[in-house]
């Protein structure tokens, strides 16, 4: 669903700016004592009665509380009975349009890094201000503007930035060179943890309607330029070919269904006949018409699911180290439109003009479904956890990403819901946490800086009131957050969330 953005303004940086202004001195030492650390989820067991020393945005030391000296003058916080995990990473977000609300919501819910999947000058400017300490927000890894085929699924009515439409191999290579010349982040998908990478984009965002020749030309040029690329697998490209070509991450599950079907060749031939009307001015109608065809073919793939073909395809992804971001919550919203809530508690942190329009937004891009189409959509939603489990069993590295910014996906809160969906799909709580920490950091090119708790790493931490390894739902029980070395304790967190709710109500 990538790319569907609200058209209203963001409401200004009032809350995020006020929150940032209360930050502690960068020279202050913070000592978190007597904590149970889940320092590298999925890699080693919890470590009890540990102390973490933090200063200047970095972790100074980690050790047994009895053996770790706390410097004079340090701010000491006793975390007896608490659990500390690395700051969570949402690997798939769209924050434009509600940035002033999304930006503080991310760290206040424990999401200290996000990967923004459609880069714009506005989002990059917000990242710059966040990095200067002017605004409360996560670390931002930001993609380029969307690179799609011609005609694209997105026109100027909804696009947050101009789409780079490429129809030929030469145009695809030129698009890569243009992104590189504008200052892409190069071989790391996020630059240094304390500073910003390139201003145009930290990676190239590829999309669904690229032709196979254009996509392969883009892949080759990206390798030459040393720029990672990620996003949708184009309709014309099998996931195994995209993986072998070097795509860093595959977003969403719809391209995977065909590769797991006993009728793959037949369905791919039908997929090649799907067209986008270049004279259609509405992005919503373009997306709706395309998606209805994709769902029809996906349904046929689900009914012809072949576990052996799935294993062979997913083994390729595993060998190549290709990451997959399932975005189960986004798929659920699109496919269970008849069972979505009218209200949730976390909606209070977003303006009513946004949340009240979500149902119509979904109708605009899915259409009014017949009973047969509704049954088909439910079938798809039921099948997606099966694909995730097959990916897990093949050893494909998975990322926790939400597509927040899309209807019914509240920034920050959506990641906790995604973790629950991943566990329901067969991941252990430790594996799900790994998808939002260790694996996500590696996918972003930040595996030595983010995603784990160790000396020298960025001081992004979440303090929980209960053990997430026994119940992944405990990630929502946030006591405090450390973001860029700054502690937001329970009282301040509650105050900031209440201020955000009031700002949303007044927006």
Image: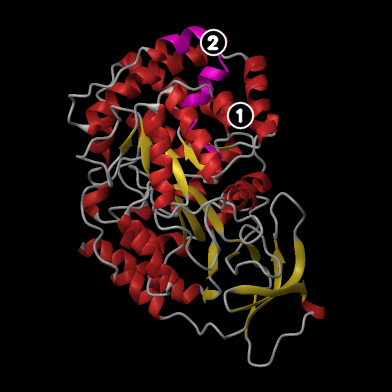
Frontmost residue, 48 versus 486: 486
The answer to if 265 sits in the magenta stretch is yes
Camera sees residue 481: yes
Camera sees residue 375: no
Magenta part of the chain? 248-269
In the rendered view, tell whether residue 426 sits above or below residue 49. Answer: above
Image coordinates for residue 453, horizontal then vertical, percent: 68, 64
Q: Which residue is mark 2?
A: 304
> Which residue is pictured at 28% across the width and 46% down the height?
161
Image coordinates for residue 77, horizontal then vertical, percent: 62, 80
Q: Which residue is mark 1?
A: 244
Image coordinates for residue 60, horizontal then vertical, percent: 69, 76
In the rendered view, tell whether residue 306 sits above or below residue 237. Answer: above
In the rendered view, tell whether residue 266 sits above or below residue 163. Answer: above
Image coordinates for residue 51, horizontal then vertical, percent: 72, 75
Q: Residue furthest bottom?
A: 72
**Secondary structure category for the residue under label 2:** loop
Crowding at mark 1 (Cα within 10 Å: few <14, some 14-19, many 20+): some
């Amino acid at each position: 669903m990538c790319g569907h953005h609200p058209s209203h303004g963001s409401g200004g940086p009032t809350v995020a700016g006020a929150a940032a202004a209360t930050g502690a001195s960068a020279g202050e030492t913070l000592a978190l004592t007597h904590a149970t650390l889940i320092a590298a989820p999925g890699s080693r067991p919890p470590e009890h009665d540990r102390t973490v020393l933090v200063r200047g945005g970095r972790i100074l030391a980690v050790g047994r509380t009895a053996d770790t000296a706390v410097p004079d003058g340090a701010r000491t916080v006793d975390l007896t009975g608490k659990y500390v995990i690395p700051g969570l990473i949402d690997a798939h977000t769209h924050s434009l349009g509600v940035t002033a609300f999304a930006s503080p919501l991310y760290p206040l819910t424990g999401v200290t890094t996000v990967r923004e999947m459609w880069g714009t000058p506005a989002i990059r400017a917000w990242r710059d201000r966040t990095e200067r300490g002017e605004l409360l927000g996560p670390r931002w890894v930001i993609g380029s503007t969307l690179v799609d085929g011609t005609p694209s699924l997105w026109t100027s009515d909804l696009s947050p930035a101009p789409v780079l439409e490429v129809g030929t191999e030469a145009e695809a290579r030129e698009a890569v060179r243009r992104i590189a010349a504008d200052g892409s982040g190069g071989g790391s998908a996020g630059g240094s943890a304390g500073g910003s990478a390139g201003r145009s984009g930290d990676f190239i965002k590829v999309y669904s309607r690229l032709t196979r020749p254009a996509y392969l030309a883009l892949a080759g040029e990206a390798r030459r330029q040393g720029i990672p690329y990620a996003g949708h697998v184009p309709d014309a490209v099998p996931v195994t070919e995209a993986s072998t070509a070097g795509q860093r991450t595959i977003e969403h599950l719809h391209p995977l269904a065909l590769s797991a079907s006993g009728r793959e060749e037949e369905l791919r031939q039908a997929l090649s006949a799907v067209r986008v009307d270049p004279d259609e001015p509405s992005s919503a109608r373009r997306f709706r018409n395309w998606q209805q065809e994709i769902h029809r073919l996906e349904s046929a793939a689900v009914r012809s699911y072949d576990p052996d073909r799935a294993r062979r395809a997913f083994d390729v992804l595993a060998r190549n180290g290709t990451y997959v971001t399932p975005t189960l919550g986004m798929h659920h919203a699109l496919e269970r439109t008849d069972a979505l809530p009218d209200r949730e508690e976390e909606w209070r942190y977003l303006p009513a003009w946004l949340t009240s329009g979500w149902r119509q937004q979904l109708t605009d891009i899915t259409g009014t479904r017949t009973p047969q189409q509704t049954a088909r959509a439910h079938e798809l939603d039921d099948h997606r956890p099966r694909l995730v489990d097959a990916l897990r069993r093949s050893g494909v590295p998975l990322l926790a990403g939400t597509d927040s910014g899309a209807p019914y996906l509240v920034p920050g809160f959506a990641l906790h819901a995604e973790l629950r969906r991943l566990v329901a799909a067969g991941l252990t709580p430790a594996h799900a946490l790994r998808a939002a920490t260790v694996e996500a950091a590696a996918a972003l090119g930040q595996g030595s800086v983010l995603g784990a708790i160790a000396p020298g790493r960025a001081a992004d931490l979440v303090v929980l009131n209960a053990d997430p390894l026994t119940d992944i739902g405990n990630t929502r029980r946030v006591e405090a957050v450390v973001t860029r070395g700054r502690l937001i304790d329970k009282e301040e967190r509650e105050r900031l969330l209440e201020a955000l709710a009031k700002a949303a109500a007044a927006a």
